[in-house]
Amino acid sequence: MAGLRLGPLLRYTDGSSATVWVESDRPCTAEVRCADGARGSTRTFRIAGHHYALVPVSGLTPGTATEYEVLLDGTRVWPPPDSRFPPSVIATSPADEGTRIAFGSCRWAAPPAGGHDPVGPDALDTLSARIAADPEAARPDVLLLLGDQVYADEISDATRRWISGRRDLAEPPGDQVANYEEYARLYYESWLDPEVRWLLSTVPSCMIFDDHDVIDDWNTSEAWLADMRATDWWRERLLSGLMSYWVYQQLGNLSPKELATDPLYAAVRDSPDGTDVLRTFAARADADPASVRWSYRRDFGRVRLLMVDSRAARVLKEDRRAMLDPGEAAWLREQVLDGRGDRAGDGATEGAREGEREGRPAGDAKSARAGDAMGAPAGDREGPYDHLLIGTSLPWLLPHLVHDVEAWNAAMCAGERGARWARLGERIRRGADLEHWAAFPSSFDALADLIAEAGTGPGAPATVSVLSGDVHHAYVAEPSWPGRTPDAHVAQLTCSPVHNSVPLSIRLGFRFGWSAWARALGRRIARHGRCAASAVSWRRTGGPWFGNQIMTLTLRGRSARLRLEQARAERDGTTALHLITDRELA
């Protein structure tokens, strides 16, 4: 009899359909049955000895929350008979009731139940417990996980012991993940946590990778990549990371319509064993990152979400270094301006055509342009959306000192002060993790220009928010453009970690980094690098806040409200989310 190894994860939802991801312990037919009669079923597919299914569910009743169960070969496996949690539900709330979006990043695997937690309470565990205690409370409509869902290079003691039983940890890559089977173990350890497992079964989720999903500072520079490719273990690590990301995270990001036309998904499902098909895809993504698009679009009523790949889509050549390759940048521009007349311009159209010519799987430009919008068509209102969310794992706006140091470093590495400074700059870049948007100055400015354009003029949204994580603290920063005032409220909203360490060095460093003294120091460093002045300035309007935390945006009509909550241990041994800030954005 087939058993449920991992899941279910409720991934995509709209007014009438959903997808539910599961991993079983053998081949079977996976089925989802809802209390209102909606259902769906599919056969599992096989990757590297593991069996998965993404079950499409249709016929859901809009505006309802219906309980569901999962069956494998006709036998119910979810919810388990001894579950202490309420039944999992698929909610299809009407778009005009508003959208509540929770987000964060950087979740290190929790220790075993009852064990000491060295990094403090898990914010997702704590959020799950609150919702379970009061299912009618303000649960998120969607959960955005903005990177570092697993840590391939910082494994737990339990996983280290498990890996040591498989291979010699004295051989590279040592006590880091080496292959697909070990990646599967990471996801199993992380998502089998009871609270997180239930939370992901009842709150839809959207995900994007960051560096630790593969390795710290993934794609920092051309020289870094050359050094990694010279090792005898990197290729297997990267291919396994991309393969497992596609299976465990990316598939669920896509709508049923996108999945139905995705050639890779079809090829994997049509094969008795899809391992070679998926490995070939990952090898192509490694050889030519521009051939694959990991970014995607989701529309929630009048809210547009663009999840942007700021890791694999980089151009690393020093003379044309960019956070996004030209096709990816054109895709982002097109999605931002889609529905606002002809403002997307010929460049965006050409970027979409480029994606179609390449046959990009997993969210190509053509399918993403169509989107999976809910609610009324865009044309019957002033603009296509009331709120624009750009999800990028790495913050766009950083503390001023950090920004200036990264811009200076980019100039040094590009040879602005000669070969000696370039060599020193590369060492500093790797040692200090200088690889955010500011380390790609042309991309930073291009994003600033695009955001200003999106937030200005007829059809402008009420808010444009850049949602990020990575930097192990939370803050709000608001930009301004000299001589130009966007009609939308624009903000950088950063929240991390969900569950990880925040050492004293980070606390002190970022507190200083936001100070006036640091800003003055940064200007001097930028002058040494002959860095051009940025077209945008910004100021911190909230934070920095440190702890295991989660942010929630509540978007209703053209209003927006932001909450930040931190998970803290209570005296009775339980954990609770404590409100840190609650403010209106628009």
Image (tube, rainbow, N blue to C red):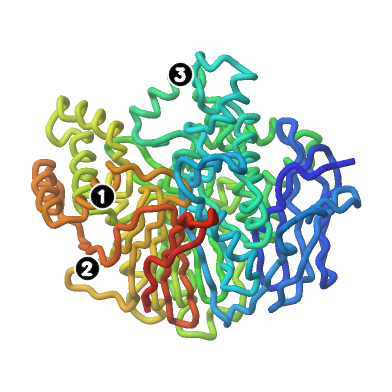
Inspect this view and state whether residue 350 appears. no
> Callout 2, which amino acid?
Trp
For this rendering, which residue is in front, 225 or 511? 511
- Residue depicted at 74% across the width and 35% down the height: 50
Q: Nearer the viewer, mark 1 or mark 2?
A: 1
How far apart are the alpha carbons under marks 1 and 2?
24 Å
- Contact flag, marks 1 and 2 (Cβ < 8 Å): no
Q: Position of residue 137 (x, y in %)?
A: 59, 73
Which residue carries the number 2 mark?
481
- Residue depicted at 11% across the width and 48% down the height: 521
Which residue carries the number 1 mark?
510
Quadrant that contains the C terminus? bottom left
How far apart are the alpha carbons under marks 3 and 1?
34 Å
- Residue depicted at 72% across the width and 52% down the height: 8
Q: Is residue 491 left or right of residue 304?
A: left
Q: Position of residue 413 (x, y in %)?
A: 22, 34
> Callout 1, which amino acid?
Phe
Q: Quadrant of residue 79?
A: bottom right
